[in-house]
Amino acid sequence: MATQTHDTKLLPVGRDRISTDDVITVASPYDGSVVGQVPRCGPDQVDDAVEVARHVPDEEPLPAWRRAGILDEASRRLADPDTAERFARTLAGEAAKPIATARQEISRAVNTFAFSAAEARRVSGEMVPLEASPNGEGKLGFALRVPIGVVGAISPFNFPVNLVAHKVAPALAAGCPVVLKPASQTPLSAVALADLLMDECGLPPGWLSVVTGGGRDVGEAIVAHPGIAMLTFTGSADVGWSIREKAPRKKVGLELGNNAPVIVEPDGDWEAAARKISVHGYSHAGQSCISVQRVLVHQSIAQDFTEALAEHVRSLRVGDPQEEDTEVSALISAADRDRVASWVDEAVSGGATVQAGGEVRDGLLAPTVLTGVTPDMRVCRDEVFGPVVGVQAYETYDEALHLAGDTRYGLQAGVFTKDLGKALRAMQELHFGGVLVGEVPTWRADQMPYGGVRDSGNTREGPAYAVEEMTELRMIVLQA
């Protein structure tokens, strides 16, 4: 893949281009090769971007029909085979996302823009029946949905296109300018997406500014800036809740971590569960907040299930993300690889057994299956964010529900059972943002209300729900 250099002529910030001599060099997590460069920005560039964003709705107004058209065009452009492949190759380079998985992400982003375009056409409000009370007689009331203001968006490295789309597209649909800080490990695709929106889809400059840099300079400047009305953040729980504390007067939407549990009952299709977990526990090296991490399987099928899962996992193709048959590649950094490997070693020291993987080969952590894990181990208690799945046997369904819910997280959980009563109990008793029956918790459709509770967040993504978060009601009263 050719190196991408985004200099002062290419990186859009406000109406102008960034002027800075310092750069961030983006390297492939797989082999360390340089895949691109972007400017290293700071608080001054954030100030410039916010200042332009605050005034652009008046100077370059975008009525709903134009916003919808721009988002529709973005969806069409991303769906173009050549454009989609270019973006997928960028993902494979900067994030070490296997190329087949990268193509799936681009396909999802196509839908995210299309759903956002639909929402732009129906942002309205609601009638309020004032005459339902005596003092409202002779008055007409309605509440308009109006843009909340400038949205500050901070996106993670693991879905550098689709999670940017989930922040930018609904904000534009709602009529809000966006100041975006992409992850410093994966900024190239975000810059390319901004270029696509402005150069090919008709988005006026200033409606989207990409400010590349680190969390301590750009990120903190966005969080603290008084000109930003709403923050939307996807990342770790610790960072997310610290942002919430630092910005008490802003609206803050958080989509945070998880340690996704799956319950496998003997009456469920445990063979299908093993196949799905072997994919969704390890896709993009387990670097998804809804990657399967904890598998709770009934003791009567635990041995057969584990053998099937381990066999599937051992067959996963590990290697170069640019190769067509690669299924698992590198974690985002060597430090993350070493951290995850140390957690595996710690679990083994505590009594767990490695059934597959567990070792580092050619710099890559092999997809790993652990049995005999316990809730106090970090591979169960915390978010691994790596290619590791722990399997624990249980005796009763009550025990399984307790173990699944015994976590500070609450994003999504899954249960495999054909018993409707057990499925209903899971829906009612598991305190998660989403409960999936007959499916792994890694499954997501981009139009659904996606988000968590407890330490997993405080908001719902999905264009219809994000647009609602990014608008506020303005009450209008007319005296007859």
Image (cartoon, grey):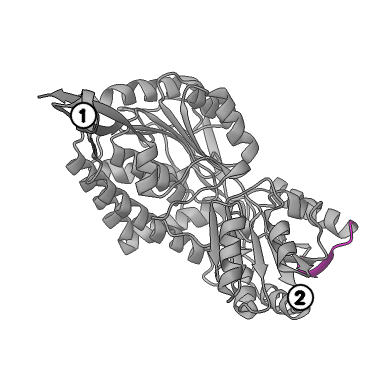
Residue at left offset 52%, top offset 24%: 247
Residue 225 as seen in the image, left or right of residue 60: right
Residue 51, horizontal then vertical, whole percent: 35, 20
Q: Residues within 10 Å of mark 2 (few under 14, many from 20)?
A: many
Q: Please tell me in which quadrant of the rendered image residue 364 appears.
A: bottom right
Give the residue pinned by disc 1: 60
Give the residue pinned by disc 2: 302
Residue 286 as seen in the image, left or right of residue 172: right
Q: Which residues are magenta?
A: 350-357
Residue 409 visible in rendering: yes
Closest to the observer, 460 or 168: 460
Label 1: which secondary element: loop
Residue at left offset 53%, top offset 56%: 434
Residue at left offset 72%, top offset 57%: 402
Q: Does the stretch in magenta take in 25?
A: no
Q: Please tell me in which quadrant of the rendered image residue 344 appears.
A: bottom right
Q: Residues within 10 Å of mark 1 (few under 14, many from 20)?
A: few
Residue 320 visible in rendering: no
Q: Nearer the viewer, mark 2 or mark 1?
A: 2
Residue at left offset 68%, top offset 78%: 266
**Rendered position, 311 above or below 251:** below
Q: Please tell me in which quadrant of the rendered image residue 447 appears.
A: bottom left
Q: How many labels, in total?
A: 2
Three-letter residue code for mark 1: Glu
Q: Does the stretch in magenta take in 355?
A: yes
Closest to the observer, 5 or 347: 347
Residue 289, horizontal then vertical, whole percent: 59, 52
Three-letter residue code for mark 2: Ala
Residue 197 as seen in the image, left or right of residue 393: left
* Residue lying at the far left of the rendered structure: 480
